[in-house]
C-alpha cells in the first residue's frame, strides 16, 4: 500500500512539473500576455509548480473519497467474516 502511494505521488509530481511548464508557456505565448514572462523565472516556476501540485493533490483526494469509504467498508466486512470462522 505504501509503495502504491509513493508511486502515485511520484507520478503526480512529474505531471505537476510538466503542467507548470505548459501553463507558463501557454500564458506567455498563446494568450500573448507578456506580463506572464516574470513567471519564467525560477521563483515563478516554483510558485506555479506548487500551485499545480497542491491542486492535483486536492483533486485526487476529492475523487478518491468514495473509494476510501468503500475500502473501509470492505475491510470491516472481511473482519466480520474472519471472526465467524
Image (cartoon, rainbow, N blue to C red):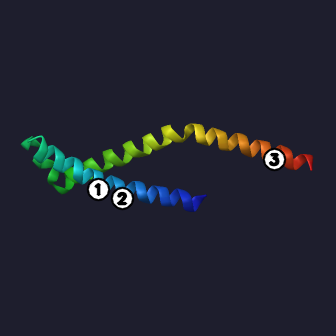
Rendered-image quadrant of the N terminus: bottom right
Q: Quadrant of residue 11?
A: bottom left
**CA distance separating discs 1 and 2:** 6 Å
**CA distance separating discs 1 and 3:** 43 Å
Mark 3 crowd level (few <14, some 14–19, many ≥20, 10 Å Cα): few
Report helix, strand or loop for mark 2: helix
Residue 44, given in percent of the width and then of the height, sits at: 20, 50
* Residue displayed at 26% across by 48% down: 47
Report helix, strand or loop for mark 3: helix
Q: Circles 1 and 3: CB distance less than 8 Å?
A: no
* Residue displayed at 9% across by 40% down: 33
Task: Judge from the rendering whether residue 14 lies leftward or rightward of residue 77; answer left or right.
Answer: left
Q: Residue furthest right?
A: 85
The disc at residue 14 is: 2
**CA distance separating discs 3 and 2:** 38 Å
* Residue displayed at 85% across by 46% down: 81
Task: Judge from the rendering whether residue 19 lies leftward or rightward of residue 24; answer left or right.
Answer: right
The disc at residue 18 is: 1
* Residue displayed at 49% across by 41% down: 61
Mark 2 crowd level (few <14, some 14–19, many ≥20, 10 Å Cα): few
Q: Circles 1 and 2: CB distance less than 8 Å?
A: yes
Report helix, strand or loop for mark 1: helix
Task: Judge from the rendering whether residue 83 lies leftward or rightward of residue 44; answer left or right.
Answer: right
Residue 19, given in percent of the width and then of the height, sits at: 29, 51
Task: Judge from the rendering whether residue 57 lies leftward or rightward of residue 41; answer left or right.
Answer: right
Q: Mark 3 highlights which residue?
A: 79
Q: Earlier in the sequence, mark 1 or mark 3?
A: 1
Amino acid at each position: 500500500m505504501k509503495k502504491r502511494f509513493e508511486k502515485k505521488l511520484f507520478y503526480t509530481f512529474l505531471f505537476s512539473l510538466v503542467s507548470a511548464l505548459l501553463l507558463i508557456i501557454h500564458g506567455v505565448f498563446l494568450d500573448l500576455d507578456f506580463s506572464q514572462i516574470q513567471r519564467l523565472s525560477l521563483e515563478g516556476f516554483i510558485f506555479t509548480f506548487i500551485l499545480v501540485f497542491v491542486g492535483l493533490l486536492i483533486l485526487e483526494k476529492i475523487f478518491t473519497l468514495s473509494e476510501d469509504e468503500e475500502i473501509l467498508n470492505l475491510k470491516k466486512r472481511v473482519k466480520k467474516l474472519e471472526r465467524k470462522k
